[in-house]
Image: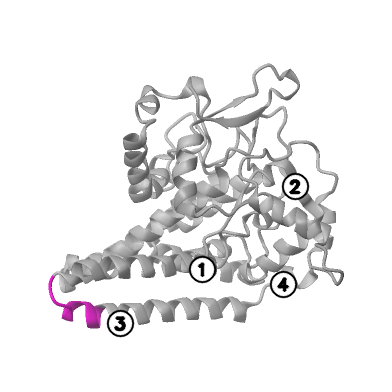
Amino acid sequence: MVGNGHSNPSDLDVKKSETRSSKRAPTSKPPFTLADIKKAVPPHCFERSLIRSFSYIVYDLTLVWILYYLATTYIPQLPHPLPYLAWPVYWFVQGCVFIGIWVIGHECGHHAFSDHVWVDDCIGFVIHSCLLTPYFSWKISHRRHHSNTGSFDRDEVYVPKTKSKLGSSAFYLDNPIGRTLTLAVKLSLGWYIYLSINAAGRPYDKFASHYDPRSPIFSDNERVLILITDIGLVSFSWLLYKVATFAGFANVFCVYGGALMVMNAFLVTITYLQHTHPSLPRYDNSEWNWMNGAFSTMDRDYGVLNKVFHNVTDTHVVHHLFSYIPHYHAMEATKAIRPIVGEFYQKDSTPFFMALWRESKNCLFIEPDEGDEKNKGIYWYRSQY
């Protein structure tokens, strides 16, 4: 608000973009350049502080330990059947903290943790291995996702199908029961299914997996990194197994496994909703360019969880423009670019659980607009067969 009591025009544009949930994102050439956007961002937003980045690891791990202590000390003392209610609460809260730690590992992969690549890779490798995420494998495919976001032909993840490519099962699952079952599988197993067999990923000529050094996802000089990744995952899995043989498999699941499942469910939810919305376009090779692809993403609002998740949820657009901005500067950078990019910025504040159901219903496949020969290389989500 300004002194005369009237809204600043840029503020009105921001409010309109936040409430818009069905208006299509612009697909025309932006009237600004990436350099114009970068000039609007305060220079300190691009600065990485090793000490500050480490402080978030210490903070998150402190929360993990406090939650672990409270759960293992007090939940077993609760009268039956209250532990059966208390453990899921612990899993949810601890799983949310796990997401924050995972996001720091993700930042390491983008070289947003410190000024030293080797430090970022060491920290990211340890963090992601302890969360059973293949660090180097996902870093490589995720980098290619950032290079090809919104491309129907080259994007690496959440690549929607056209109507003609849908299997018959999609039709039979297009109902409340089918959507519930589909979401249950996606949220419980979807992350590992994607990593294992590249489900919902870019089609390749042969079998693709984030665990296979020979996978077509990777180039020859990257294959040794995939082997290192696998060694990290096997080593931590072996450590979990040894702890389970000593403390009991049920105890390991209660303390770690349940929270990890919540983390995986949120990973799928967050990434799916960032790239799936009726207003977001997809482009074939004739229409795609990097800038428009970067803007074919959506900021979402998870309420208080935005802070727990280190704002990976509501700063995704600026992250696709400048992936090396640390999370602790991303909100400031987002606010700085919005007056410049205007309607190219997309945000939907629908509660995430409602948005998850809505998008699973309304974003079944993509097709170009019928009869629009000028824009036949631009695809939009559809829900009607």
In this view, the mark in front (4 or 2): 2
Q: Which amino acid does label 2 sit on?
A: Glu
Q: Which residue position holds label 3?
A: 69
Question: Separation of disc 2 and disc 1 at Cα?
Answer: 26 Å
Which span of residues is magenta-colored?
Answer: 72-80
- Pair 4/1: label in front: 1
> Looking at the picture, how far across and down is residue 189, in whole percent?
34, 48
Secondary structure beneath dot 1 equals loop
Q: Which amino acid does label 4 sit on?
A: Glu
Vertical relation: 310 (above or below) 294: below
Q: Name the residue under label 2.
A: 343
State the separation of the CA atoms marked 4 and 1: 26 Å
Name the element at disc 2: helix
Q: Distance between the residues labelled 2 and 3?
A: 47 Å
Sequence order check: which comes first, mark 2 or mark 1? Answer: 1
Residue 65, compared with residue 264, is above or below; it is below
Q: Residues under labels 3 and 4: Cα distance?
A: 36 Å
Q: Position of residue 332 (x, y in %)?
A: 71, 68
Label 2 crowding class (10 Å Cα cut-off): few <14, some 14-19, many 20+?
some
**Quarter of the view holding residue 46:** bottom right
Residue 47 got which mark? 4
The stretch drawn in magenta includes residue 336: no
Q: Which residue is drawn at 83% across and 49% down?
A: 33
Residue occupied by mark 1:
304
Give me the residue at 68% from left, 57% from top.
Answer: 318
Q: Do the residues labelled 4 and 2 touch (CB within 8 Å)?
A: no
Tell me the amino acid under the disc marked 3. Tyr
